[in-house]
């Protein structure tokens, strides 16, 4: 080949290489950049965030998920999850029947209350007893009505199987409890109540979502659940014995008009107030707060329950049903009470309605939440336009876990490599896919066990998929212990599996492993509750393990490493561990810096500075060379998404969706802020001219202007 042709070839080849490299550099192949793992490898100053932050486009994403976006060339990939239509008609039917039965019971209770307080022929104490009994029936009926109408919105029952089970069991027991109160002289009714309460205890245990903590006195939540299971049977037979031995009341005298008016007010006026107070108190109990609860219900150190007062059936239908119920009470109190034969049938109708309502509530809130089907899907979005290219449902799960507000059914971020990517959904499986959305392989025998769901992501390096599952299990549990496992990205073939000794209560691991080259070997670093361990990427052989106690109640922050140190974050601060000392089994802690925060999001390392934020709203910058905190600043809010470095800036996004861009420097400087308008738990993804932010319902693309209007090089992060 002549020199001329060589020159021409080089002239054509160089632009192709440049565009290929620049395009690949914009890729973001997994959690925290995957191969970068929270380390900004370049000091490029490529994006200027000092101007007004603008949304280039935003796209609604079907379902609910907290996974970060993954960028491969011109496609954006993320996971989501949503409830399928399986069994929806039956659940809707139960919702309608619950509303109708609770309203019927409330109407019957109101009519009986008016009749009991206005009828003549009863002594003072007997009338007072009837009034109290009517007050209880009215309050119980209205409380169940509130649970059926507003329970899902006020208590977030759609996202908590355990909470829904508690509410359903309590509502069913209250329904059965009205049997002896509606017909106090019916001794067979008290026996029926005791039998039904015993059956409810058995059913509550069968459908208990966490049977492994039954009768576990070491956990306060387990004691409450055990009480919910046992109390119906115990109270049922105690009430049966006391009511069976009770004597029939005698009728003497007639109450005066003021006394009758007072009793009507007690039964029909105070009962709704008591029911509302009990309903609201139950909601505050569900907050599980650690301090005084303000009027908005947000506990200071816990994720609040999202409350909305929209009834299940909608306000128009509820208003119509309420009007009909009031009309029935007026007509019934005028017409029905004058007919003794009709009046005798009312308690029996009330007993029938209460039994049906109890069964319906238990099915609706305690049985069917375990049977609701969740579809797990992968979504591909066009990076240029924001349009959804395709959505693939790839896995299903019939059990809705008791997730907290900072987790979802699709939290793990996709991990990509050469030729494809994998999506992890825990019990629903690990799936290998190509960029077109075709499933290449499926693994469903690997699982992660924790009542809080999955918070960690898979890792891909050299065609190997790594999943580290530190379970939260109790000593008497059966099944697999904690483990780290490796699959082939190409075909899903099992490459190796190593057990881990962390399978203890409250010890689930939610941090993603990282892959680093240490002494010429690709090594997987895994942070556990009591250890920091290193495994050979290709063989799974344990290289070394360091006993390192995690110093807070939840293990969240992933590791960050440079050439010399690996940085470990927890609720007490930052520890720098010497990699060479770890490999040689020497004391590894080079230095430590206190920085308080119970839940610490994964940090980012840039220019010798370690940036991170906590769930208390405090942002930190640690100078790793000086081994001290360069600055700390209260940004406000609660941070669960990891920090990223981009250009001259570091980006923090809090739970409420407020984006704070600060200077990538040793002194704090706030560059700009913008509110996304919805909650954000996923880590942002830097791009050449902006960033991707995944909210709870939308994917946003924020634009920025180039610094000094120069050509934009590849992003760092």
Image: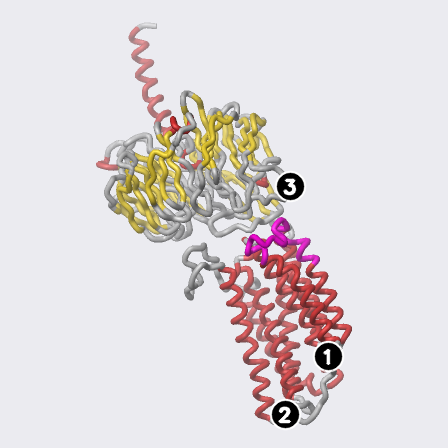
Judge whether residue 653 can be spotted in this image.
no
Neighbourhood count class around disc 1 (C-alpha, 10 Å): few under 14, some 14–19, many 20 upward = few
Distance from the alpha carbon under mark 1 to that under mark 3: 49 Å
Q: Which residue is mark 1?
A: 246
Neighbourhood count class around disc 2 (C-alpha, 10 Å): few under 14, some 14–19, many 20 upward = some
Span colored in magenta? 202-223
Residue 449 placement, left or right of 527 = right
Residue at the outermost right position:
188
Point out the image quarter for the N terminus: top left
Q: Is residue 211 magenta?
A: yes
Q: Which mark is residue 255?
A: 2
**Which residue sits at x=41%, y=52%?**
678
Residue 698: horizontal and vertical position, in percent?
44, 47
**Which residue sits at x=47%, y=28%?**
544
Judge whether residue 368 can be spotted in this image.
yes
- 3 vs 2, front mark: 3
Point out the image quarter for the C terminus: top left
Q: Of the two numbered discs 1 and 3 on the same chain, state the one appearing first in sequence.
A: 1
Which element is circle 3 on? Answer: loop
Q: Of the two numbered discs 2 and 1 on the same chain, state the one appearing first in sequence.
A: 1
**Which residue sits at x=30%, y=49%?**
673
Residue 201: horizontal and vertical position, in percent?
68, 60
Q: Cβ–Cβ below 8 Å for labels 1 and 3?
A: no
Q: Which residue is mark 3?
A: 478
């Amino acid at each position: 080949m002549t020199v001329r042709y060589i020159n021409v070839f080089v002239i054509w080849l160089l632009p192709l290489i440049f565009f290929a490299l620049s395009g690949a550099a914009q890729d973001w192949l997994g959690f925290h950049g995957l191969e970068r793992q929270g380390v900004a490898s370049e000091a490029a100053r490529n994006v200027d965030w000092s101007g007004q932050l603008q949304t280039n486009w935003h796209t609604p994403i079907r379902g609910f998920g907290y996974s970060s976006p993954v960028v491969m060339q011109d496609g954006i990939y993320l996971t989501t999850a949503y409830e399928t239509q399986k069994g929806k008609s039956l659940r809707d039917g139960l919702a309608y029947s619950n509303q109708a039965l609770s309203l019927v019971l409330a109407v019957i209770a109101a009519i009986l209350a008016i009749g009991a307080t206005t009828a003549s022929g009863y002594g003072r104490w007997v009338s007072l007893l009837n009034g109290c009994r009517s007050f209880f029936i009215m309050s119980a009926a209205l409380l169940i009505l509130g649970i059926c109408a507003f329970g899902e919105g006020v208590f977030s029952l759609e996202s908590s199987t355990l909470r829904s089970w508690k509410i359903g069991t309590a509502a069913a027991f209250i329904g059965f409890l009205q049997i002896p109160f509606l017909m106090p002289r019916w001794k067979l009714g008290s026996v029926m109540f005791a039998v039904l309460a015993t059956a409810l205890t058995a059913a509550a245990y069968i459908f208990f979502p966490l049977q492994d903590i039954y009768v576990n006195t070491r956990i306060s939540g387990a004691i409450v659940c055990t009480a919910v299971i046992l109390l119906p049977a115990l109270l049922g037979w105690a009430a049966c014995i006391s009511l069976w031995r009770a004597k029939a009341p005698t009728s003497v005298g007639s109450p005066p008009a003021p006394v009758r008016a007072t009793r009507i007010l007690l039964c029909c006026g105070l009962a709704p107030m008591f029911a509302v107070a009990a309903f609201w108190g139950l909601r505050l109990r569900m907050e599980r707060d650690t301090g005084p609860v303000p009027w908005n219900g947000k506990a200071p150190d816990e994720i609040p329950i999202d409350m909305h007062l929209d009834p299940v059936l909608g306000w128009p239908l509820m208003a119509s049903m309420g009007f009909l119920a009031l009309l029935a009470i007026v007509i019934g109190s005028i017409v029905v009470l004058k007919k003794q034969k009709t009046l005798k049938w009312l308690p029996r109708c009330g007993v029938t309605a209460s039994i049906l309502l109890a069964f319906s509530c238990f099915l609706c809130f305690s049985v069917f939440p375990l049977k609701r089907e969740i579809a797990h899907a992968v979504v591909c979005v066009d990076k240029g336009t924001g349009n959804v290219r395709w959505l693939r449902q790839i896995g299903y799960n019939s059990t809705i876990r008791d997730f907290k507000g900072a987790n979802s059914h699709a939290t793990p971020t996709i991990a990509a490599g050469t030729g494809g990517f994998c999506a992890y959904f825990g019990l629903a499986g690990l799936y290998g896919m190509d960029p077109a959305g075709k499933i290449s392989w499926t693994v469903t025998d690997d699982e992660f066990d924790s009542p809080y769901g999955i918070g960690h992501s898979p890792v891909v390096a050299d065609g190997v998929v790594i999943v580290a599952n530190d379970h939260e299990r109790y000593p008497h549990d059966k099944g697999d212990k904690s483990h780290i496992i490796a699959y082939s990205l190409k075909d899903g073939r099992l490459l190796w599996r190593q057990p881990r000794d962390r399978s203890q209560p409250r010890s689930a691991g939610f941090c993603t492993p990282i892959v680093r080259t240490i002494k010429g070997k690709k090594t997987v670093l895994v942070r556990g509750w009591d250890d920091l361990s290193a495994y050979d990427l290709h063989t799974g052989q344990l290289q070394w393990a360091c006993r390192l106690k995690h110093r807070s109640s939840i293990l969240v922050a992933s590791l960050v490493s440079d050439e010399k140190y690996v940085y470990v974050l927890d609720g007490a601060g930052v520890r720098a561990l010497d990699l060479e000392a770890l490999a040689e089994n020497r004391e590894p802690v080079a230095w430590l810096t206190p920085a308080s925060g119970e839940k610490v999001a994964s940090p980012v390392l840039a220019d010798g500075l370690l940036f991170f934020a906590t769930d208390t709203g405090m942002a930190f910058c640690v100078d790793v060379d000086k081994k001290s905190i360069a600055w700390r600043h209260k940004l406000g809010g609660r941070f669960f998404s990891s920090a990223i470095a981009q250009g001259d800036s570091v980006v923090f996004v809090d739970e409420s969706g407020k984006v704070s861009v600060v200077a990538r420097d040793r002194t704090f400087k706030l560059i700009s802020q913008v509110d996304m308008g919805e909650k954000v738990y996923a880590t942002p993804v830097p791009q050449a001219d902006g960033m991707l932010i995944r909210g709870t319902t939308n994917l946003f693309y924020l634009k920025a202007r180039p610094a000094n209007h120069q050509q934009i090089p590849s992003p760092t992060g």
